[in-house]
Image (tube, coloured by chain):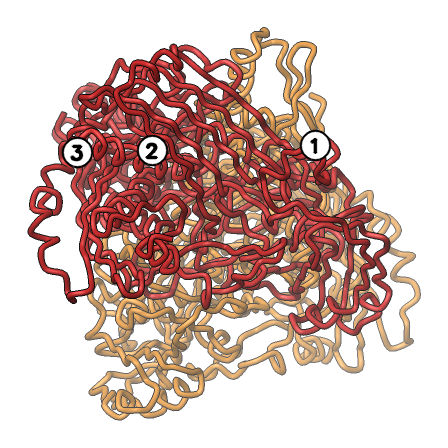
Chain colours: A red, B orange
Amino acid sequence: MSLRWIGKPIPRQDAWTKVTGEARYMSDLSMPNMLWGRVLRSPHPHALIKSIDIAEAVACSGVVAVLTHRDVPGLNAYGIVVQDQPVLCGDKVRFVGDAVAVLAAESKEAADHALGLIKVEYELLPGVFDPEVAMQQSSPTIHAKGNVLRHSKVHHGDVEGAFADSAVVVEREYRTSRPISAFLETEGGMAMLGADGVLTVYCGAQYPDRDVIQIARALGLERDKVRMVSTLVGGGFGGKDEITVQIHLALLALNTKRPIKLVLSREESMVTGWKKHPMIVRMKTGATSDGTLLAHEVSIISDTGAYASLGGTILHSAMEHCSGPYRVPNVRVEGHCVYTNNSISGAMRGFGVNQVTFAMETQMDILAEELGLDRLDIRIKNGLKDGDKGALGSPLVTAMGPVQTLQAAGQTELWSQRETYKAEPSRPWKKRGVGLAAAIKGCGLGFRMPDFGAASVELLPSGFFRVRVGCPEIGQGNTIAFAQMAAEVLGCSVDQVEVVTGDTGETPDSGTSTASRSIYVAGNAIIDAATKVVELVEQGISARLVVDVEEVELGEAEVRAGGTALSYLDVAALLLQNGQTCCAAGRFDAPKATEEVPSVYGLPHLVFGTNAHVALVEVDTLTGQVEVLQVSAVSDAGRVINLQGLEGQSEGGTVMGMGYALTEDIIIDQGMVRTLNFNNYIIPTAMDTPPISTTVVEVVEKTGPFGAKGVGEVVCISITPAITNAIYDAIKVRVTELPATIERVLAGLQGV
Amino acid sequence: MSLRWIGKPIPRQDAWTKVTGEARYMSDLSMPNMLWGRVLRSPHPHALIKSIDIAEAVACSGVVAVLTHRDVPGLNAYGIVVQDQPVLCGDKVRFVGDAVAVLAAESKEAADHALGLIKVEYELLPGVFDPEVAMQQSSPTIHAKGNVLRHSKVHHGDVEGAFADSAVVVEREYRTSRPISAFLETEGGMAMLGADGVLTVYCGAQYPDRDVIQIARALGLERDKVRMVSTLVGGGFGGKDEITVQIHLALLALNTKRPIKLVLSREESMVTGWKKHPMIVRMKTGATSDGTLLAHEVSIISDTGAYASLGGTILHSAMEHCSGPYRVPNVRVEGHCVYTNNSISGAMRGFGVNQVTFAMETQMDILAEELGLDRLDIRIKNGLKDGDKGALGSPLVTAMGPVQTLQAAGQTELWSQRETYKAEPSRPWKKRGVGLAAAIKGCGLGFRMPDFGAASVELLPSGFFRVRVGCPEIGQGNTIAFAQMAAEVLGCSVDQVEVVTGDTGETPDSGTSTASRSIYVAGNAIIDAATKVVELVEQGISARLVVDVEEVELGEAEVRAGGTALSYLDVAALLLQNGQTCCAAGRFDAPKATEEVPSVYGLPHLVFGTNAHVALVEVDTLTGQVEVLQVSAVSDAGRVINLQGLEGQSEGGTVMGMGYALTEDIIIDQGMVRTLNFNNYIIPTAMDTPPISTTVVEVVEKTGPFGAKGVGEVVCISITPAITNAIYDAIKVRVTELPATIERVLAGLQGV
C-alpha cells in the first residue's frame, strides 16, 4: 500500500496558535457577568463533620452562593468505577483537600475572603496512612465497607514446581512513589446555564461523555440537559480522566444561573489531584541457568488513598503487566488495593504498569548478574512473541514487539558502545553507567469493557472535511493523526481536514482519551466513516456529471471525474446544493481477547505497544546526585501515523519517566501534603533533559488503523528502570525504592 | 393534515438574547490585536481623480496600511448583476461617498486622524442629477457605455383598441422618493486571515455565498480561500444584499495580516447606503363603465444613481407589478433605468413594486371616483385569480390571493365601519379619511434565475437536530420558521432543533435572504432533508432494536420503537456510535413559469404573496400634518408557519410603508446628501405607530412548504397608497408625489 500522509511528519494543526500563545486554554476563557468559584477543603485527613455554618460567608459582600452537601440535588458522589467520593462531604472527610463547600462570588478576591468565613466544626478521627496497616482488621475504617477496595488473585502453571526447577531465584521488595501529573494547567473550567436549559461545562478533560454522566447523576438532571466541551488541555496524563471541578462548576452554575469559573491553585491541584498509586511490589522470580524465566510470584499492595476512582482497575493492570515484556510460564499474582487517608490516587500515564515494570526490570538485571548473562541477551531470550501467553496465562495473538524492540535497543550506539560512553566521567568522583529496560503496555480498555471508536466525517460547504470524534485532544497530538488518517482515506490534503474532538454536543462518544487507545479505536472509526464519505462523493459526482464511478477520484487538491477536475469547493456545492448527503458516521469495535482471565475484570488486553530505553547516567559519588546524560528510546507503536507526534510522545514520556526515577514524589506526612508546589516537588526541566534519540520499530498490528497501535503510555515506562539499572551499572547500588533521590543513592553508596 | 408546530406562535429562539442585549451583533465583535479600518470617500458627485497622495497618512503614528485602487489585486469592481462599482476609485468618482482609499490603524482615533491626511486631487466634472436629463444624448456620461443602464419594453393585447373601448381613462404622473433602509445597525464587519490561509469576513449580510464570489474576484483569490459568516443582522431590508464593507475589510485583512474591523458611521451609511429607486411613473389606465380594467399603459423612469447593482432587475420587477394585484387584458409598459450622480440605488424591501403599486392604487381610486363605484368593489372585481394573466401577459398558475385578501379587508371593522371612524376628528380643523389598497409581490427570483433551496439536517450527538441553510436570518424570523418546519417533519419538539444560517463554511448555499424567498425555497429544502433524516433514524432504530420500521415513531420528546421509548440523546448515541449516519442534505427547485416574458430577463414570477391595508388618517388642515390613527392589515402568505413572525413582519412592514408614505426621503441636492442622520431623515417611531391589526388569509400554495408563500416584502407595499388614498378621502388632495410631507399636503390643501 502506497501511503500519502501516514507516517509523514506533518506539523500539528494546533502548533502555530499554541506556540504563539494565540490558542485559548481554559484559563483564558471568560464570559460577561461571570462569577468566580472556590472550594472549601478539609484541613484534616480524617474527621467527622459536626456542623457547617455558612451564614457569615453568605452575608459577605459580593458572595452570590454558598453551597454544601445539602445543596447537591442528585447523588452526592462520583467516581469512574465506584461512586464513593462525595461532591461535597456531609458526614466525614477522608483526606486533606476533601471538598466541604463551594461558593460563587463576583470576584476572586471576594471568593477568597468569603471562603475563610465558612465555619466547619470537625471531630478528628485517627488516620490510616500505611496501606499494610490499613489492611488489618483492627485499623480504623475509612469507608463503611472496609479498607480493602480490591483483592484479586490469579495464577497459572505450576509455580511451586517451577521455582523448584529454577537454577536461580531472585526475591526482592520494591516500593514506588506518588508522583502527580503536574500539568502546566491546573484543574479548572467554566460553566453556564443556557437559555435552552442546557448546562454547558467547559473544562479541559479526557472523557467529556463520561463526565456528563457523572455531572447529571450528581445534579439529578437528565443527561441531555448537560453538555461538556473539552477546552484545550494543558496536560492530562490521566489526571483529568476523573471528575475534577466539573460537578462543582455545574452545581454553582445551576444555582446562580450565571456563568462561573473555577480554577484550582497549584497548591490545591497538588493536594487534591490524582496521584499515581504508590505500590509495594514483592517479586520472586526463578530462571534456568541459561536465563529462561520459569516462575514468577508477585504481590502488589496499592495505596488508592481516600477514594476508589480507578484504583481497582489500575491494580489489575499492574497484575497483568507484572512480568513486563517477558514470557513466564508459571505465574502467581496477588493484589490488594486499599484505602488510606493519603490523598487520592488515580489514573496516571502507565496505569499501574510503571510500578511493576520498574520491579520486573530490576529483577531481570539481578537475574542476569546472578547467572553471568548479558543484560540484553536475557531479555531478548524471554521477550514475548505472538502466540505466547501473557503473565496471567492469556494468549497473545496480536503483533508483539518486545524482541524486535530489544534488538533495536541493542543496536543503538548508546548500548553497543556503552563502555566508551562510560569511560570518561566528567569528574574523578563521578561514575557512569548504562542501563537498559523494556516495557509493554496494553492499548485500550481490556476484556469486558466496552471499547469502541465512533466518528463522523463530513464534506462541508467550504470544501473542507470535518472529522468529529469524542476522544479529546489532550495535547498528545491525536488531532493531527486523525486528520492524516482521514486524508489518507479521502485522498485530499491533510490541510483540507478539520478535526473536532471532545464536545458531547457535537462529537460522537468515542470513549476516553486514555489507555493509549484514541489512535487505535477512533482512528479505525474515522477510516470507516471516511470510506463511506468517499463512496458518497464518488457516487454523487458520478450521478451529477454522468461519468462512471470508477472514473471519479478524490485527489489532493481536486476531484477528477472523467476528463474534468473540480475543486473540493465546487464538489461540495455540486453535491450539497443538490440534496446529496456527504456525511457519514463510522464505528470500530476493538477486538477482544478470546477468553477472560477469571476473577479480574477488565483483563486481559489484546493489543500491546512496546518500548525500550537505554540510559546513560553519571552519579556523583560524593553527593549521590544522578544526572541522566543521554537516552536512546526505541518505540514500537505499530505503523507510525505521525513521526513528529511519536517523537514528541517519546521525548515527553522519557522525561516524565526520568522524573519518576529520580525526583518526583508527593510527600505526605500523616495525611498532610508537604510538597505543595514546584519548589519541592521537583520535575525535570529543559536543563535536566538529556539528548533523547528515538528509534522506531514498526511491528505492524493488522487490526490497527493502517497498522498503528497506541503509544501514549508505554513511552514513559521503561525509562525509569533503565535509569535505576544504569545507576547500578555505575555504582553497584540497587535502587528498589522510587525515586532514587540523592539521599537514597548516597545511603546506598554508604552501604546503609 | 394535522400539524403540530406549523402555524403556532412559537417564540423565536433568538428572542431572549436579543431583548436582553446578550446577543452579539457585528458591532459587539472584537478580536485581540484588532485594527480599525476607515474609508476615504469622494466629496464630489462627479470628478476625475488626478492624483492620490498617501505619504503623510502612511507616516502617521498608528497607521498600519493605506490602500488605493493600485492595491486591489483582482477585479477592481463589484455589483450583483453588473460589476461597475469600483472597490476603490482610480480614475473618477461618480457620487458623493464613492470610495477612494481605505486605511487600517491601531485605533479608531488614529484611523480618523490619518484619513484627513490623504490628499486627493480632483478635477470636477458636471454632474447629472435628473434621470430624464441623464437620458438625453447631450448629457455628460457617467459610465463609458452611456447613462441608460436598462431600457425594456413589453406589451400584450391591443392596448390602443382597449383604450378606445374604455368608458373612462385616467392618466397621471407619479413621482416616488428615495428612502433608505435605515437599519439600526449600520454597515460594518470584521475580517481576519486565518493561519490556514482562509480569509474570514464577519458581516451582517443577506447573501454571504455571493459576497464570497465578489470578495474573491476583487482580491484575486480562489473562492475556497474566502469564508463569510453573516453575523446577527441588525436590519437588512435589501440594503445588505449588495457588497457594503466586505471587500474593503478583506483587502485590509489581507494586507495587514491582522484582524480588522470597520463600521460605517450613520452619516456614511446615509451617504453610501443603497436607496430605494426613485421612479417617475406615468400611468394611463382605461376601464369600462362597470369598472372592469381594459387597458394600461405605463412608463417608468428609474434613477439607479451612480452604479447598477440591481437597478435593471428592479426595473423589471416594477414593470411586472405595474398593474398591482389587478387583471388588465391589454398592457404596454416601457421602462428606463438610468445612471445619475445621485448616490446609489439598490434593493430595498419591495424591489420596485412599492413605486408602481403606489401609482396603480391611486389610479384605482381615481377610476372608482370617476365611475362612481365603491373603492373596494372595483378592486375585488379586477382582482387577479388563478388562471388569469399577469400585467405582462404571463399565465398565473399558482394560488393567487387578491380577491380573498380584498374581501377580508372589506370585512375589517375599520373599512366596514369607516364612516363611524371618520365621524369625529380630534379637533375641528382636522379631517379624517380611510383608504384602502392592495398589493402583490412575487416570491423568489423569477424566470431564468437559478432559484433553489439547499439545506442539511442532522441528528447531533447531543440529541438535538441541527438545520444548516445558507439564507441568513436577517431579523425577519426565518430561523424559527425553519425550526418549526424541521420539527414538523422530524416529529420532535421545536426546542430540539437548532438552526444555523449564513456561514459559507458551514451552510449550503441556499440563495439570498431577499425576494421574500427564504421560507419558500429553504423551507422546502429543509423538508426534503428532514424527511431523509426521519428515514435514516427509523431504519437505524429498526435495525438496532430489531423492530419493524413501521413501529418506529419520532415523537416530541422521545422515539418510540415497538414497546420501548428512547430519548433523542439515547437514539443519537445508539445510531452515531454504531456508524449509522443521521445527516442528510436536501434540495428544492423553485418551480418556474412555463414561459418567459420576451426581452425582460428575470420575468415572470410564479408565486405571489398578497397584502391589503386599510388605513385611517387624520389630516391637520392648518399644518398639513398627517397622522395615521389605525391600520388593518390583511396578509395572504399562504399557510402561516409562525403567526407571531407574520404579525411581526406585518407590523414592521406597515410602519416602513408609513415612513415611505409620509416622511422618509434622502434629500440629494446637486449630488450632495442633505439628510445625514435621523434628525432630518424622519422614520416613524413607536410614538408614531398606530394600532395595527393583522388578519390572516391563508390562500395555500401547494408548492410551498406546508403551503407557505413569502411575506417579507408584500407587507410593506399597500400601506403607502392606503395612506395616500385615505388622505384624499379626508381632504380631497391627491398625493402623486412621495412622501406626502406636511409641505406637499398643505400645498394641496391650498390648491397649489
Per the image, the residue denoted by label 2 is A360
Nearer to us: label 1 or label 3: 1
Residue A137, numbered label: 1
Q: Amino acid at mark 1?
A: Gln
Of residue B38 and residue B494, the one placed in the foreground of this image is B494
Label 2 lies in what chain? Answer: A
Label 3 lies in what chain? Answer: A
Q: Is residue A524 among the parts visible in the rendering?
A: yes
Q: Position of residue A475 (x, y in %)?
A: 38, 49
Few, some or many residues within 10 Å of mark 1 (<14, 14–19, 20+): few
Q: Image height check: is A226 above or below A257?
A: above
Rounded to the nearest angstrom, the CA distance separating label 1 from label 3 is: 45 Å
Of residue A197 and residue B50, the one placed in the foreground of this image is A197
Of residue A195 and residue A502, the one placed in the foreground of this image is A502
Q: Position of residue B622 (x, y in %)?
A: 80, 82
Q: Quadrant of the N terminus of chain A?
A: top left
Rounded to the nearest angstrom, the CA distance separating label 2 from label 3 is: 14 Å
Q: Residue at x 28, y 67 (%)?
A: B254
Residue A376, numbered label: 3
